[in-house]
């Protein structure tokens, strides 16, 4: 009886464990698969696109928002590519 109980627990644990792939497939447009399929983003907005966010924020502090439109748009594009509706 103990053997069948442990098998049942193992099956339940295996079913509850999500499968995570190391490689992210990309759509033909170069966007992540999550964005192309309309799925939810895999991270929070505050953690997405740290490179473009850092460059955008530094530019705004140093030069003012009106002088950083290219970096602001680059960050918006990165966020959209990550699956956020910006």
Image (spheres, rainbow, N blue to C red):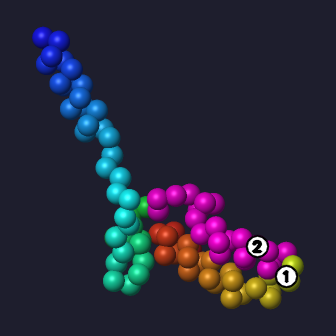
Residue range corresponding to the magenta coloring = 41-61
For the point 72% across and 87% down, the residue is 69
Q: Do residues under tags 2 and 1 come within 8 Å of each other at their CB atoms?
A: no
The label shown at residue 49 is none
For the point 34% across and 70% down, the residue is 25
Figure check: 40 above or below 14: below
Residue 84: where, in percent of width, then height? 51, 69
Element type at mark 1? loop
Residue 77 visible? The answer is yes
Task: Tell whether 76 sits left or right of 5.
Answer: right
Task: Tell whether 81 sits left or right of 53.
Answer: left
Q: Is residue 50 magenta?
A: yes
The label shown at residue 64 is 1
Magenta: main secondary structure = helix
Residue 60: where, in percent of width, then height? 81, 78
Residue 38 visible? The answer is no
Q: Which residue is mark 2?
A: 57
């Amino acid at each position: 009886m103990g053997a069948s109980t442990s098998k049942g627990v193992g099956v339940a644990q295996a079913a509850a464990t999500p499968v995570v792939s190391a490689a992210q497939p990309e759509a033909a447009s170069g966007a992540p698969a999550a964005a192309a399929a309309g799925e939810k983003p895999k991270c929070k907005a505050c953690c997405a696109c740290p490179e473009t966010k850092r460059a955008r924020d530094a530019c705004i502090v140093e030069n003012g928002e009106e002088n950083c439109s290219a970096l602001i748009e680059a960050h918006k594009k990165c966020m959209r590519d990550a699956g956020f509706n910006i």
